[in-house]
Amino acid sequence: MSMDNKDFILVDHLNPRFLTFGTQQSLHDLCALDHIFLDGTFKSCPDPFAQLYTVHIQSSILNSTVPVLYSLLPNKTKNMYKLFFNELRTVTVKHDLVLNPRFITIDFEQGAISALKHIFPGATLKGCNFHYNQCLFKKIQELGLQKDYYDSSPDDPTSVKSLFKKTAALTFMPMSEINDLWCGIMDKFDHIPHAQGFFDYFTETWVDEGCLFPETIWNYYNFDGPRTTNGLEGWHHRLNSNIGTTNPNLYVVIEELKKDYAFNMATLKQLENNTNKPPRKKQFIFRNQRIMDLMTRYGKGALSLEEYFVKMCNTISTK
């Protein structure tokens, strides 16, 4: 598959300058599905742009996400994201398509979240669960609790590791129960040095009224769709490796994006009539089945809230 640059450019916005790459097929694929995934990378971004921002869809053929649009954006402001998403809607309309996703999975980036709420008010925004856990662990590191975390016994119910697992497990609890469960966590772990810093952070960032990221974004109770953007992270790693340098030439990046798009489309075409799909990793399949089974059992009354919470904590992976 080969194409001229002009055939690969869907948006060339002048002020501020940003570019969006893809094809008419990209737009058809994007508008045909109700769940999209968004993420950015900075390592492979050429001057004068600040990030390479990509739009992915879930491929049932590959059992993973696939990039369909690639954008070079000059900054990460709310206004920039609003302009970008508006241009996406405009270009789809020009091709007699409608971009109106029901679900959007993203990283925890305030500018993008605010813009998406404005442009797609009917969409359900979900933050990546993997990045949610990363945020919790980063705060543990910032508070100087990393050594205590790694030294913790996995069986110690009062350790830093247990604090992390219980906080992480809140994402799978009914939203109506989160405040009480969180108060119980704070009472149980207030003996840990610097724990108050973690309590303040989690309360102000994830729980309080007016917090940065409301529970509707990070909570996955009774949500059976994808919970992470890990496929996007893997794609970023591959692209960065292929480009091989920071601050690359613009035309080098465009050529790599064209190759990437062509490779993905060829792979999908090859697998369309193949019933042997690439397998998901067994540990991910088992963990997801375990989570959904616990939700079902709790929903049917087979588990009390306390039993459900304890069992869900045990599904949380630790570093």
Image: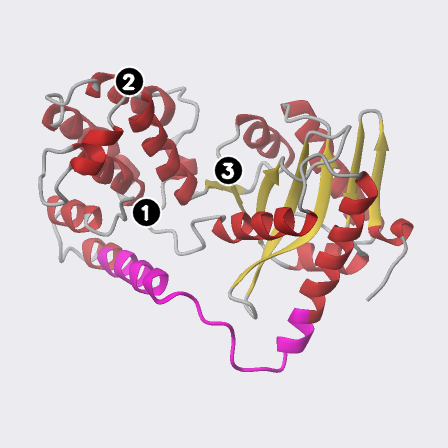
Task: Name the disc covering residue 107, or none.
Answer: 3
Q: Is residue 36 visible?
A: no
Whichever of callouts 2 and 1 sits on the residue coming sooner in the sequence is 2
What residue do we see at 31% from left, 41% from top?
171
What amino acid is found at the position of numbered circle 2 in the picture?
Asp
Residue 200, label in figure:
2
Q: Is residue 315 above or below residue 88?
A: below
Real-space Cα distance between discs 2 and 1?
A: 24 Å
Depth check, mark 2 against mark 1: the one in front is 2
In front here: 69 or 206? 69
Q: Between marks 3 and 2, how big is the CA–CA gap? A: 22 Å
Left or right? Give the position of 113 relative to 319: right
- Residue range in magenta is 267-294
* Direction from residue 12 to residue 275 in the image, left or right: left
Q: Residues within 10 Å of mark 2 (few under 14, many from 20)?
A: some
Nearer to us of marks 3 and 1 is: 3
Residue 75, above or below 273? above
Q: Position of residue 288 (x, y in %)?
A: 33, 59
Mark 3: secondary structure: loop
Query: Mark 2 and 1 residues: CB-CB less than 8 Å, in contact?
Result: no
Give residue 231's position: percent from left, percent from top: 52, 54
Marked residue nearer the N-terminal end (3 or 1): 3
Structural crowding at the residue carrying mark 1, measured as other residues with C-alpha within 10 Å and reported as few (<14), some (14–19) or many (≥20): some
Front residue of 152/246: it is 246
Q: Position of residue 293 (x, y in %)?
A: 25, 61
Q: SS of the residue at dot 1?
A: loop
Q: Is residue 291 left or right of residue 27?
A: left
Residue 99 percent location from the top left of the image: 69, 48
Residue 252 in magenta stretch: no
Q: Magenta includes 282?
A: yes
Is 172 in front, or is 5?
Answer: 5
**Which residue lies under the disc numbered 1?**
221
